[in-house]
Image (spheres, rainbow, N blue to C red):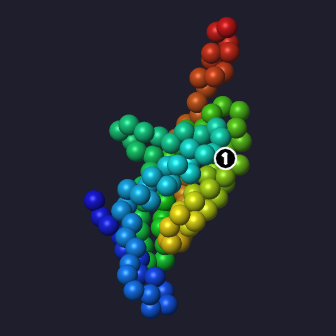
Amino acid sequence: MAIFKRVPPGGQKGKVSYNAGIVSGIVSLAVSEVEGVELLSGKKRGLKLYFEKDGIYADISVRVDYGYNVPEVAFKIQQTVKHNVEAMTEYKVAKVDVYVAGVDFSEERSAEQN
């Protein structure tokens, strides 16, 4: 697993190291904070991060619950991920792409069966 290092500006001594798993955990937590969406898991992972010079690029694949406005949910994911990563680390988020892989109708089905 890679370790990404950030040297603080202003000539401060020392450095802060972030494991890629830490940043991935922050992004996963941010997605879980958004209501009506679930990060994909299993064979098809729902999260890919790319660390570039101009910031972090995130590809996030989710399943949205039936009844939620997809563009609003996707925008909220982008906002939450950017805010959390930039608040908890010193990385900048360059881009967050959200891919909606499907809609979960399970709550509607269970309501019809009752």
Going 37% across and 61% down the picture, which residue do you hit?
20
Q: Is 96 situated left or right of 40 in this image?
A: right
Query: Is 46 located above or below residue 79 in the figure?
Result: above
Q: Secondary structure at mark 1?
A: helix
Judging by the rendered image, the residue that carries numbered circle 1 is 73
Q: Examine the image and state in which quarter residue 105 appears.
A: top right
Can see residue 99? no
Q: Position of residue 51 (x, y in %)?
A: 41, 68
Q: Is 73 situated left or right of 5 in this image?
A: right
Going 49% across and 90% down the picture, which residue do you hit?
10
Furthest residue toward top: 114
Q: Examine the image and state in which quarter residue 50 appears.
A: bottom left
Q: Examine the image and state in which quarter residue 5 appears.
A: bottom left
The amino acid type of the residue labelled 1 equals: Val
**Quadrant where the C terminus is found in the figure:** top right
Q: Is 105 situated left or right of 2 in this image?
A: right
Query: Is 14 located above or below residue 112 in the figure?
Result: below
Q: Position of residue 90 (x, y in %)?
A: 50, 72
Going 28% across and 59% down the picture, which residue do you hit?
1
- Front one among 88 and 12: 12
Q: Position of residue 43 (x, y in %)?
A: 35, 38
Can see residue 74? yes
Q: Position of residue 67 (x, y in %)?
A: 71, 33
